[in-house]
Amino acid sequence: MDTKRRQLLRIAAAGVGMGFAASPLEALACRPTTPAKPNHLLIDVHCHIFNADDLAVRGFANHIFMHTSGRGVLNIGNWLSQMVDWLGQLSAPGIRTETRLLESILTGRVDPYDAYCRVEHPHGGILAQASNYRLHNALAMMALYPETDLFVPAMVDMDAHLGDQALVTPRQQVDLMEYIFVITGGRFHGYAAFDPLRQVRYDEKRPNGRDSPLSPLRIVKRAVMEQGFVGIKLYPPMGFRPIGNAALDGCKGINPRAPKYDAVLRELFDWCATERVPVITHCNDSNHANVHDSENSECQHVGSPRQWAQLYESHPEYRGHLKVDLGHFGRADMHSRNRLKLLDAERENWPNAPDLARQHAEDMKEAAGFIAAMAAHPESLFADLSNYDTLDTDRLRKAFSKDMREMIAAHPHLARQLMYGTDWFMTPQGAVPYLDNMRDALPPDRHGPFYGANAARFLGLRRGEATRRRLEAFYRKWGIADPDWFQRVDSTPAG
């Protein structure tokens, strides 16, 4: 975004009463932190530090929140989406600005914390994370969760399916994130985002350009092999499945190129299986790009756990070699909350009890889908409990604890497959209680592998494993010491 546009948007924001006061995170992020040493390994296997420049904000708002195409002069949703886009990006630092800051830190010209706090002015309010430097978001998480050994942030690439374009390209995101991995001393190593539609479009324009540095597949492969990334991020709710995309041909909201996705994804998965590169995928029923409007069940719930199980059934060579994290585990925290609501409604004879009963049944059906797929492929499929923000009362935490104990007792394999994650909690109000609430509901002395050992096995972090070897080479390339959490991973029981 050019300087004039940023100035204009600042004036516009002031005009609508949207001030940007200094954030309480400023004091946190500007204070160097080192990991505390709890009694267990702690890995946040699903988090984010991107800002608004990395996301196709207008397209996301149009398709996900307002369910519009974004077309038409009189389309009110499009105007509102454009305003959200502007507000989200008006104070996010440009890619060049942040790159210059990171390079000045890496070359030793300035102290990272001193320079960062002097140059950057973190913002508060609902757009804090979207409008801050990515480095600030990383430092804030380190300060909010000092006991976390490793954060694994996921990039985003939704442009092609949203009919919009983020200000920062995936390759620029990758290059900038590599700097953050180094500056934070190995406390962050992320997932590089991949969208098969972007690759299909690239192949149509450059049929012989698969080895070009701008090929999306080439970008994510380089990110993992050379730039400190530990895995690949997929977002099927945008309109694709891990396998069988020909069945989506003609579905409402699905790009007509969908039948071509299988070949692209097969190439990605072959490489991931060979190189032991893990994949994280958004896997709960949310954030669909128009797919939810389809009446054909074949078109809905793209990227469901069952579809991932079908991938292993069709390609048994992937079993145990291609490891996939099914993000959000069906929002089991919501199931506990809705169960309590149902109990209250039945006890008080509330008229909405039948509706709550139906909702709870749907909740349990979603969780059952995760469990069935994970039971069929226990060494390949994992799931993270991230964005579980409803565990904010003692009653809810106790209910969730009870539900999870019963679920794991009935399905013991889950104890080796479930992993801890935060997702998007980076403000003092939402973040500080998050880990405490989770520990209260799932005590580490009873669910120790959940907080780190399972993630270490999923990511391949133990000595001699593929991801570990790549990270060791990455640190040698940059001339920095191996992080302390290497020793903690190696000394932690496998779970």
Image: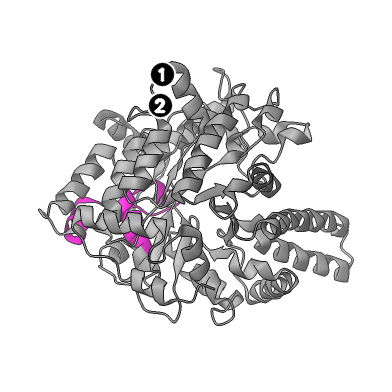
1 and 2 marks in contact (CB < 8 Å): yes
Nearest the viewer among 318 and 435 is 318
Quarter location, residue 329:
bottom right
**Residue 101, x across and y down, in percent:** 20, 47
Mark 2 residue element: loop
Q: Is 13 on the left-hand or right-hand side of 286?
A: left
Q: Identify whether 170 is placed above or below 328.
A: above
Quarter location, residue 261:
top right
Q: Is 233 on the left-hand or right-hand side of 68?
A: left
The furthest residue to the front: 317
Q: Which residues are magenta?
A: 113-141
Q: Quadrant of the N terminus?
A: top left
Q: Is any part of residue 319 visible from this angle?
A: yes
Q: Quadrant of the C terminus?
A: bottom right
Q: Residue at x 59, y 58 (%)?
A: 382
Q: Is 489 on the left-hand or right-hand side of 389?
A: left
Q: Is 164 on the left-hand or right-hand side of 287?
A: left
Mark 1 residue element: loop
Whether 139 is among the magenta residues is yes
Q: Identify whether 291 is placed above or below 129.
A: above
Instruction: Say which residue label 1 marks.
Output: 206
Instruction: Say which residue label 2 marks.
Output: 210
Per the model, the C-alpha gap separating discs 1 and 2 is 8 Å
Q: Amino acid at mark 2?
A: Arg
Q: Residue at x 37, y 50 (%)?
A: 229
- Residue 290, disc: none
Nearest the viewer among 411 and 51 is 411
Whether 39 is among the magenta residues is no
Q: Circle 1: is it few (<14), some (14-19), or many (20+) Cα within 10 Å? A: few
